[in-house]
Structure formats: C-alpha cells, structure tokens
Image: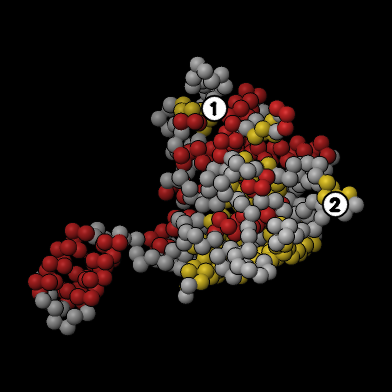
Amino acid sequence: MLKHLKITNVGPASTMELEFGKRMNLLTGDNGLGKSFLLDIVWWALTRKWPAEVNPKLTAGKKALPAKPGDATINFSFTDKNKRESYESKYLLKEQAWTGHSGRPSNPGLVLYAMADGSFAVWDPARNYWRTHNGVDVQNRRPAYVFSPNEVWDGLPGPEGTWLCNGLIRDWAGWQKENGQAFKHLTDVLNILSPSSKEKLVPGELTRISLDDVRDIPTIRMPYKQDVPVLHASSGMRRIIALAYFLVWAWDEHQKASKQLQEPNTNQVVFLIDEIESHLHPSWQLSIVPALLSVMNKLADKTDVQLLTTTHSPLIMASVEPCFDREKDAWFDLDFMKNKVVLTNREFEKHGDAATWLISEAFDLKSGRSIEYENLVAQASTLLETDKPDTKQIKKMNDKLIAALGPKDDFLFSWRYVCKQKGWLK
C-alpha cells in the first residue's frame, strides 16, 4: 500500500507531502489546484508509467514536468509484502524522463485507476512486468493496461489483430451466456453499487440495437420493468456500469494470470478514482464510497484495499462520516492561500449533512445559497447592524428575503426574530 508521497517543484505547489491512510483517502479542493494531477503521480509511483505514455489516445494522464527551472523530485514509499520500500526519482532534462530503479516495480499489488473522463488503467503484478538484462530493462510484458473511454466498451486491441481485452459489451454478453463466476461477480457488484433497494442495477436480457450491429448488447432492467441497452443508459448508470465491469474484469484476469504463473493472488489493491461523484445523482453520491469499499472486500475478501479518491461533492463527504476511521483513513485538502497552493492533511470532523459540509474547509462556501441570494443576505446583515435603520428599508428587505429564501432558511428565521425583538417588524 502507498505510505508516503512528496513532490518538489512538480505541479502547482512548490512542495506537496502526503502520509496516506491505509484504507480510505479523500482529496478535496477547488478546480485547477492539482487533485487529478496527484492521482497521476500516485499511479506513476506505483507503476513507473504515465497513463498517456502507455495509451497515447488519452487526453489526460500525461507525464508530469518540472514547474520551474531547478531540480524536480518525486519521493514515495509503499509496503512491499512485509517491508517498506522508499524511492526518490529526479527529472533528467536531457533524457526528458524521470529516473527509476531498473527492473519491474517492487509494488506487489494490483493498481486500478478510474479517470474522470471514463478512461481506466490497470497494473497487475501477474501480467505487467519486465526483466533486467545486464542492467538494462527488457520489456517482455505490457507495462499496464490503459483504456480510452471507447476502449472500455469496445475492447482494447493488441498487436497483429489480437485483443488484450474484449471490452464491456462483448465480455458482459459472453459472461451472461456462460452464466459462470464472472457473470455472478458482475451481478453482485452491480447490486452493491446500486443506490438503493428500490433502484437496483439488474442485468436484463441480451438484445440487438441495429440490423448492422451483430453484437449482442447487454441491458439493464429498469425499475419500470423495461430492459434498456447499456449503450442507451444514462450517464450516471454508464459510469457505474463501467466501474462494475472494470473491477470484475481486472480481478478476474488477475486470478487467471496468477493461476497460470502458479502464484498466489495479490493481497493488496490500490484503487484510484478521480471525481468519484461524476455523473451521479445525489442518492448515488450518498452510497458510492461505502459501496466501493464493500465491492472490493467482496471480490477479494482476503486482500487489503486502499482507496484514493478526489471529490467536489459535499454529499460524498457526508456519506463517509459513518465509516471514517482516523486510524486508517485520511482527508487532504488543497487551498489557494496568499497566491500559493497549499495542501493540508485535515482532521476529519463530522458535519452531519451536506449543507454544513459546503461551508466547511473542504469547500469554503459562505452557504448553499445562490450568489445573488447570498449577496442579499449580506445586505440584510449590514442593515441589522445599523443603529436606527429606516423602517421602510427593513420592510422592503423583509419582503425581498421572504421572496428569495425558503421558510426554513436559518438566516430568515434569525432576521425576523431580531427585527421583532427590536420592534422593527410586527
């Protein structure tokens, strides 16, 4: 599992340093401060390849570069079976590359990366490795499996007409026809990732969607009892469907490869997921993190799972309150302060609901109101501080607040109480 990461002169901050929790790690912060970038760095630290280096079709996951002239370093450590491995990598300008130890990465575990645009990447210790000959790396296996969004669904091609992965459409259809262990796992994972007992993701009957497309297309049985082709499902459903397939495919292939090599399955999985709430309805956001932890434990019940996720959602933060454990979880927050990007390992405090999380250090908003309504509240607050306000102004502001704010709004309640106490309103 990843233990520590420190980057210097790389990315938006001069230095960033993280001590990871061994189970769940949450990363918050405004757009453009480096959340996705940090996940790319973590992927590289564990696999020694940038996602776009393996698959140039990706628009994200590019190689990190020094931010300014001078030395740039990436320091990281992770547990290698029973010991801790530590590395320092420097960027070499002439080689335009980061230094690294020769041979395969020491990381013994499976590394999964779900990117915000629908791309996926897998590094499998049983399938992605290379050997060293006379001190030179000799690649004899693929360095990783990296899928563009289309390749997740349609398959990842290999050399000379081969397929490295059949893709969601063909694999799902094949698994369903076989009705074996892979399809059972997929059905179980879809069930766990469903937002509620009333909205279960259940595979329907295979179908065809075109005379010119001879593939059997999987379907999802909707709550209204209609089977909808997965290609026609909503963006949120496709996100969950792709996640479910990705997890099942990666673990299934790892088991098969380990068996061929006559080696035990890995006992570690690191799962990186960018913008975990992407496309998801609020009800799904409230269940996705606990569900993913449950899924990984179900697929690999004797395997330690470490989750690293970025989020912009107060619902995500509220959803993890019941399961957050300070002994094995961590929350990191990126802020822009005094013209600098600052990363803070924050103490996780329960706020009770999403609205309160909005005004926490995670999101730094004044309230959950619109900007226009928040400006109105500010004007009303200023009026309350006036010694002898014009009663016409008070009445006019009161009418505006009633028209703008909901009857349960805390400020509206306080406003009317103060005004009545001071005799400004009847």
- Which one is nearer the viewer's eye here, 129 or 408? 129
Three-letter amino acid code at disc 1? Pro
At horizontal 40% and vertical 62% (from top left) the residue drawn is 358
Q: Quadrant of the N terminus?
A: bottom right
The answer to whether 326 is drawn above or below residue 63 in the figure is below
Q: Left of 41 or right of it: where is 333?
A: left
Alpha carbon of mark 1 to alpha carbon of mark 2: how far? 46 Å
At horizontal 73% and vertical 29% (from top left) the residue drawn is 160
- Which one is nearer the viewer's eye here, 151 or 170? 151
| Colour pattern of the rendering | secondary structure
Where is residue 347? Give x, y as percent.
54, 70
The answer to whether 317 is drawn above or below residue 190 in the figure is below
Which of the marked residues, 1 or 2, is nearer the chain's N terminus? 2
Q: Quadrant of residue 73?
A: bottom right
CB under 8 Å between discs 1 and 2: no
Q: Secondary structure at mark 2?
A: strand
Is residue 6 visible in the rendered image? The answer is no
The residue most toward the right is: 134
Residue 218 is labelled as: 1
Residue 136 is labelled as: 2
Three-letter amino acid code at disc 2? Val
